[in-house]
Amino acid sequence: MSRLRRLGPDDWETFRGIRLRALADSPDAFSSTLDREHGFAERDWRQRLTGPVYVVEDPDPVSVGGAFDNAGTPHVWGMWTDPDHRGRGHARRILDAVLPPDRPAQLDVNVANAGARAAYERYGFVGTGELEPLREGSEQRVELMVLRR
């Protein structure tokens, strides 16, 4: 049975492991890169765990996601599920944990990532049509999606 767990700064090595796996598996899903985050120091990893970040463990981490405050609106970031564990509701469990039940939220999704977009739409997010580059110099685009409650 899988378990949902909130990570704190002392779990930085666990977070580092799954985050680097996510960046290696799905480099076009994130605005950051594997090379960039390989260079992070322990303090960088700890700092990233000051906001809500959750993993689903089965028994090792197989899914991760978090949220940060964007001018009073929760913004989902870093969502990823190991390909062998997709379709099991892990993203929903993480979204339920990181998002307040009574507030709107937002996230960015690569327009080419139909699987992630479908998962977010099932949760209730809708596209805004607002596009921007995935990262500086990239031709890929991400769309802002919002969840209105």
Image (spheres, grey):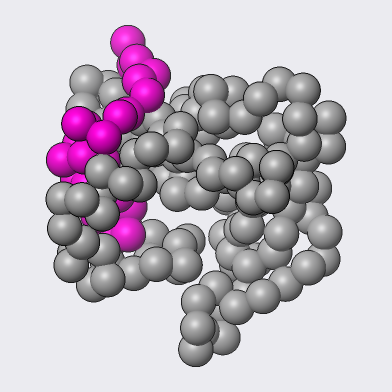
Q: Position of residue 34 (x, y in %)?
A: 27, 67
Magenta part mainly helix, strand or loop? Answer: helix
Q: Residue at x 67, y 75 (%)?
A: 132
For the C terminus, the image quarter is top right
Q: Position of residue 133 (x, y in %)?
A: 60, 78
Q: Position of residue 71 (x, y in %)?
A: 69, 50
Residue 1 located left or right of residue 146: left
Residue 143 located left or right of residue 137: right
Number of numbered discs overlaid on the protein picture: 0
Q: Residue at x 45, y 49 (%)?
A: 78
For the N terminus, the image quarter is top left
Q: Which residues are magenta?
A: 1-25
Examine the rendered structure and indicate whether residue 32 appears above or below residue 47.
below
Q: Residue at x 26, y 54 (%)?
A: 44
Examine the rendered structure and indicate whether residue 3 appears above or below residue 65.
above
Q: Nearer the viewer, residue 55 or 114?
A: 55
Q: Nearer the viewer, residue 48 or 140?
A: 48
Q: Position of residue 21 (x, y in %)?
A: 25, 52
